[in-house]
Amino acid sequence: MLKGKAHVFRDNVSTDLIVPGRYSHLRSNLAELAKHALEDADPEFSKKACKGDFVVGGLNFGLGSSREHAPIVIKMNGISAVIAKSFARIFYRNCINVGLPAVICDTSKIKNGDVLELDLKAGRLKDLTQNFELNFSPLPKVMRTILEDGGLVEHIKKHKDFKL
């Protein structure tokens, strides 16, 4: 069970918005790059984000170039999961690969600052602030295992193989 505050963003949040191109020189300094995550959408995001919080998006979250740094810097800001109506395919997979849950569900009722509780296994999202519950397709066991292991690289290190 994951619990935290919602940081709500709009539809079509691109990887360029998550990791602005002007900071591409920081790709080898992820701690510094993480300070600039989503700053063009919310200049205070990295200062406001707390361990366990959620990034909540609309449609097509993570579109654009395949920047694996995008989910990494979101995770480095303490975000426990990204929840959106839909994801760009490569961003979704990059999230799982780096150990950041990506959940597809209707986010239209969630407001910035709402406290959420997320159960990946049961496929349930509770908005504790507004007192409503949303159901979504639970993540497949293989994805939950990869996430529990800390991402794909850690999963392979742990099992010495890609064990499903």
Image (tube, rainbow, N blue to C red):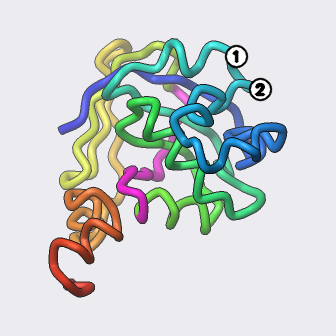
Span of residues in magenta = 97-109
Q: CA distance from mark 1 to mark 2?
A: 6 Å
Image x and y of residue 24, in percent: 76, 46
Q: Which residue is mark 2?
A: 40
The relative height of residue 85 versus residue 1 in the rendered view (above or below) is below
For the residue labelled by badge 2, is the local secondary structure a helix, a strand or a loop? loop
Q: Split into 4 quadrants, where in the image is the N terminus?
A: top left
Give the labeled residue for mark 1.
Answer: 43
Front residue of 103 and 66? 66
Categorize mark 2 by other alpha carbons within 10 Å: few (<14), some (14-19), many (20+).
Answer: some
In the picture shown, does residue 78 fall above or below 137?
above
Q: Position of residue 19 (x, y in %)?
A: 70, 41
Q: Is residue 138 visible?
A: no
Q: Is residue 57 magenta?
A: no
Left or right: residue 95 versus residue 127 is right
Could you classify mark 1 by the number of other residues whose Cα lies within 10 Å: few (under 14), some (14-19), or many (20 or more)? few
Q: Are marks 1 and 2 in contact (CB under 8 Å)?
A: yes
